[in-house]
Every structure is written in C-alpha cells, then in structure tokens.
Amino acid sequence: MEKFFKLKQHGTTVPREIIAGATTFFTMAYIIFVNPNILSQAGMPKQAVFLATCFAAIIGTLVMGLFANVPYAQAPGMGLNAFFVYTVCFGLGFSWQQALAMVFLCGIINIIITVTKLRKLIIKAIPRSLQSAIGGGIGIFIAYIGIKNAGLLNFISDPGKYSPAVPSSSGWINVATDSINVDSSVVPEIVKFNTKEVILSLIGILITIILLVLKVKGAILISIVLTTIIGIPMKIVDLSGIGVSSGLATSFKDLGVTFGAAFGKEGLLSLFSEASKIPLVLVTIFAFSLTDTFDTIGTFIGTGRRTGIFDEADEKALQDGKGFKSKMDKALFADSIATSIGAVFGTSNTTTYVESAAGIGAGGRTGLTSVVTAALFLLSIFLAPVVGIVPSQATAPALIAVGIMMLAAFKDVEWDDLFEAIPAFFAGIFMALAYSISTGIAFGFIFYCLVKIFRKKAKDISPVLWVASALFILNFIMLAII
C-alpha cells in the first residue's frame, strides 16, 4: 500500500487517508438519495437511478484513486442532473433515454479533448490571478452550500415573481412539492434560531470550529459523528430505518431498464433521426460538455494547487510531458471517462465533486482517500438506511469549515490592482451566487478578455482563452434561446 500510493512521499498515513475518505463520502453521500429523486421526475425508475448513482460513483472514484492517485471523488453532478430533467427532458422535449445518449456522447467528447491535450492547454492558459480567484471562489461556493444545507437561510420573493420550474398540467403551483423559479426579487435572510434542526446545525458548526482550532486530528469527521449522535435525542436522526436495505433484488431488476438505455432505439438510435432537431441535439451536448469540463478544471485548480496535490513538479510534467506523465493528466482522464460510464448505467453527468475538498481538508493526499470513499459507496448499496441517518446538519459544518480554509487562495490576488481584481471578483463571486463553478469561470474569462482589450493588451490573451470565452458567450446565448 505504501509503495502503490506513496504515502510517505505525500506526507500522509493510512489512518489519515481512511478518515479523509470517510469525510469525503459523508459530505457527498446525499447524492445517492437526491439524484434518484430528481431523475425519476423524467420517468426513470427511482431504484435503478439509485444503483446507477452508486455504481457511477464507485467506478469513477476508483479510477481516480487507482489510476491518478489523487484524493478526489466522483458522482453524478448536482446542477447537471437538474439540467438533464428540467431543460433537456421537460423544456426541450427529449426522452430520458435520448438525454442519456447525449450524456454518453458528452463523455466521449471529454475523453477526446483530454487525450488531445485540449484540457491541458486550457489549464496552462488560465492566468495565475484567475487560478487563485477560482480557488477562493470555490471556497465561497462550498461554504455557501454548507450554510444552505445547514438550513440557516430563508429566501423571500415579492408576490407574483415566481413560476413553476417544471411544466404543470394544471398551471398551479403546489408549494409543497413543486420546484419554483424566482426572479431577482428573491432576498436571503438568516432564519430564526427556534427550530431543533437549526439548533443542531449551530451545535455542529461550534463543534467543528472548536476541534479545528484545537488542531484535533480528524476534526471534520469527528464533528460529523458527534453532531449525528447529538441529533438522536433531539429526534432529528431517525434510527428506526437502520438495517440492510430491502428490495435490493427489485432495484437490480429496475437497473435493467436504465442500463444500456442510452444505446437503444429510444436513445442513441433515435437521437439523430429528425434532421430538424440535430442542431438542438448538438447544442445540448455542447452545454453538457462545457459545464462538465470547467467544473472539473475549477475543482482541480481550486483545491489541488494550494494543498500540494498538484505540486510544481507535477505542473511542469503537465506542461512539458507527453502522454499521462502527470497526476493532473491522469486525473483529467479519470474524470473524462466517468461521465460515459455513468450514462451506460443510467444517470446524468458524473463529475469530480467539489466536496472532495472536505476530505482534502481532513488530510487526504493520495488515491487511498478515493478508494475508501468508493468502498463506502459500495457499502451504501446494501446499507443505504445507515448512510441516510447522517443529517445535513452534521455534514454542513464540514463544508463551511473547508470553505473557510480555501478562502486563503484570495490572498494571492492583487486586489489593489483593479485590472487584476475585476476578473478575479467575477470569477470568485459569481461561482457562489450563480451556484456553478463553470459560470464563475465563464465570467472570469470574459471579463479578463474585456480588461485586456480595453487596456490595448489583447495580444497578451491566450488563444485558448479567446476560444473558451467565445464558447461561454455562445453557450449563454443558446441557453437563452432554448
């Protein structure tokens, strides 16, 4: 194990990697319950999606750990699953089988741009100031996710400023069950600290901060466990459902419905059958691919550089080496194949999870962290109720703490230089406010180009940034049209 993962070389130990892997798993385990709920709205069997989510996470994370030897976990991405259902299926009228086919093709495109070094060129083209802004922006994004998951925010909108996110036959909004689109009138506010759920979140945050300040080893995982235990007498954690997951045979039977559906007559074979729809199909695949690619690049840059996972030697190998000489090369390839694997099983885009930062914050530095996370995803297939007892109030403080740590990346941005501060601001802030890593990167790129143009330094802009910025603008235009 020492020889394979090079633990001493990376300054870590087996216990630390195990703790880190468990930390990553518990901060992202929500996806095995949330993803089926979202994709099932498109008509996919919920239990099949549950298994597809688990298998996609297991395979993708194992490849990341064993091939790239980095502590990142993969699973179907939030946001991308919503785009799959609400835009591709409901908005554009594609079947879920056709949507899976598009996700599979997106994965193939990602493999091609990785093998042909396009992803590497993108990373090399991003200025250092923007890289730092992306790292700090991911910190804000992660902390914001934690604050929301902790239930510390309410969002208020002016009357009449909302509409159903999903088409409804009745035209009426059921506030208990329907997703709602709200315009910019929405305003966040802190909740009243008068419910047991909010109180447990505050207790969890306090425990996490105290353990971190005292420099307790495994602080983040310990805080998750302690907060979960405290939630039992508060009747937030329900132990009645603990046991081996029932209906596993039925779940595997349902998996037969989604497994390979991307290639059937209702999937890939029908995707290009109507010539009038081919441009729309290509636009949708492009939107999938662009978001997936830049989410991953942002996660690697934001978490890997500062922690030394991708050090100077690795960066040099990335720039000068051929083939898969660097860990970043291998990690990008591992991520690129995960999306197609997930589509084969029956789920939306599989991507590198920003929640991996929680495991990295707990000390994870090698692929052993990922192997542990993958093993826990495998175990969750049989013990889903056990995984399900960990409340969001226990994992949210971990995300907040990691977000705090990652904000240190902002110190490398020269904020007193307005020309550097403008693109850094948009990259960092929009990442959280738009709830999307790729959107933050898009605005950072676009404003970087604008600043350079008006300073009459357009020649300093890398051709890669020109193309990426143009593609982002094109993507925004196409999404506005469709």
Image (cartoon, grey):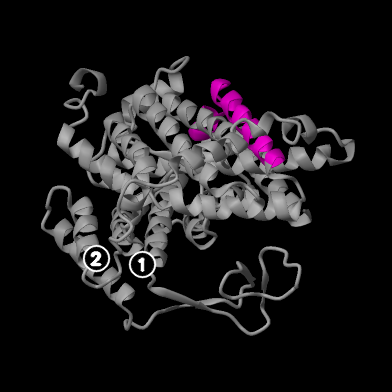
Query: For this view, does 467 lie left or right of residue 448?
Result: right
Residue, x 71% and y 50% (percent of image)? 89
The type of residue carrying mark 1 is Ala
Q: Quadrant of residue 470?
A: top right
Q: Nearer the viewer, residue 156 or 238?
A: 238
Q: Residues within 10 Å of mark 1 (few under 14, many from 20)?
A: many
**Who's the residue at 66% across and 65% down the image?**
165
Number of marks present in the image shown: 2
Cα–Cα span, label 1 and label 2: 9 Å
Tell me which residue sits at (29%, 64%) in the image.
237
Residue 378 in the image: state x and y as whole percent. Answer: 36, 36
Residue of label 1: 150
Q: Earlier in the sequence, mark 1 or mark 2?
A: 1
Looking at the picture, which amino acid does disc 2 mark? Gly
Res 40 visible: yes
Which residues, given as a range, are shown in magenta?
97-124
Q: Is residue 137 left or right of residue 363?
A: right
Q: In terms of image quadrants, where is residue 389?
A: bottom left
Residue at the spot of label 2: 204
Secondary structure beneath dot 2 equals helix
Q: How many other residues sit within 10 Å of disc 2, few (<14), some (14-19) or many (≥20)?
A: many
Q: Are marks 1 and 2 in contact (CB under 8 Å)?
A: yes
Determine whether the residue tagged by mark 1 lies in a helix, strand or loop.
loop
**Magenta region includes residue 451:** no
Q: Picture coordinates of residue 387 (x, y %)?
A: 33, 50
Secondary structure mostly seen in the magenta stretch: helix
Q: Position of residue 351 (x, y in %)?
A: 49, 40
